[in-house]
Image (cartoon, helix red, strand yellow):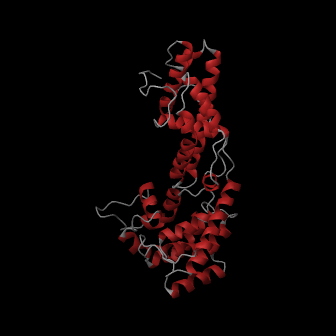
Amino acid sequence: MEVYNYAAFAKAFELGVTKPNMTKIAKALFEPIVSLDGVVNRVGNLYVTDSKYAKAWYEQSSDIPENIKKAATRADLLDSIGAYFNDNIMDEVVSQTQSSAMNSALVRLIKNSDLEHNLQHELLQLYNSGELPDFLGKAFLYSLVADNTQKGSDAPVEEIDEDIRTFKELIKRSHKKPKGITPPDEIEDHEIGYVRELYRVYGEVSGQEYARPEDLDSEPTLKKNFNRQRKDYYLAETIHRELRDTIRLDEEEGFELLKDAVYEGVITTCEKPYYRGFDRLTAVMEHATSVPLSNNLQDRMLDWIGLGEKKGVCHMLVNDSRLGWMEDEEAEEQTV
């Protein structure tokens, strides 16, 4: 039997959200509770539904605070929650094109959960009568009472997997691959690692020292290569930011899995002997384009990872000191 708590509700609810960032969702859901008079934390301050709380509640590493649990049972809130959801959730948060998947998942969760029978009956009546704001609002409030750290032992795995597949397909249709960020004229702080390594590579080729992009102006071939490497880096950075900021909290971990997959695919090529660092850079970038990604990983990345993104991830691995183009490991001190 599935435990009916906030985490279970949230995982079903997010199926109906176009951009399911759980911090934004949690803020919208908990607003009518934390804004009530008297709902304060242990030191008497108002609750702030930030990313720390949202992540902990979603991942079930923390229970819902007791004062929020008590407030969720207040009669005045139960009476007004439908109006709040109607005005602030139904159109502002829930996508009409994705709401059916959410509703189906919630109904199955309620039917297969440990929620009290009379509350199950009440929620299903609201759903069947088309009173969706009240259905969602009360389904949310009822989910807060149970222990949020408790996980069900008999979850309907096949049904949940189908909801996840549906969710992924909806996300893919509603989130087209974002246009790559145009590299800015100035080198940004997060680029310093891989850019310094490129300067060293180019210096080995020309016998000159480079510390800033304009130093390459006298070497058009190297400057062209440098611009191409930055373009690939920003293709990968575009996907990283989009997944981090607008999709799901756990996709930060997903992007790390992508970096691991690319690393495992290119490290043997990188460790081969080369005459120059430029030869190693070229060989690794050529091989990176053929590194296979599992279907599961491509799903997590929404099928957004192409050839340029794979090459850009290699530069991220240089930033992480997992790859390098020169034989020696000590980078020269340069100012970008």
Question: Vertically, is 291 above or below 211?
Answer: below
Closer to the camera, 69 or 164?
164
Residue 188 visible in the current orientation: no
In percent of the image, x 62 and y 53: which residue is there?
Answer: 294
Closer to the camera, 95 or 5?
5
Q: Residue 49 in the image: x percent, y percent?
A: 44, 59
Quadrant of the rendered image containing residue 57: bottom left
Name the side, left or right, on which 247 lies relative to 49.
Answer: right
The outermost residue toward the left is: 43
Question: Vertically, is 17 above or below 209?
Answer: below
Quadrant of the rendered image containing residue 307: top right
Q: Residue 33 in the image: x percent, y percent?
A: 44, 67
The outermost residue toward the bottom is: 118
In percent of the image, x 63 and y 77: which residue is there?
Answer: 131
Closer to the camera, 34 or 208?
208
Question: Vertically, is 206 above or below 308?
Answer: above
Q: Residue 78 in the image: x percent, y percent?
A: 49, 77
Q: Residue 86 in the image: x percent, y percent?
A: 60, 68
Q: How many marks?
A: 0
In percent of the image, x 65 and y 37: which residue is there?
Answer: 308
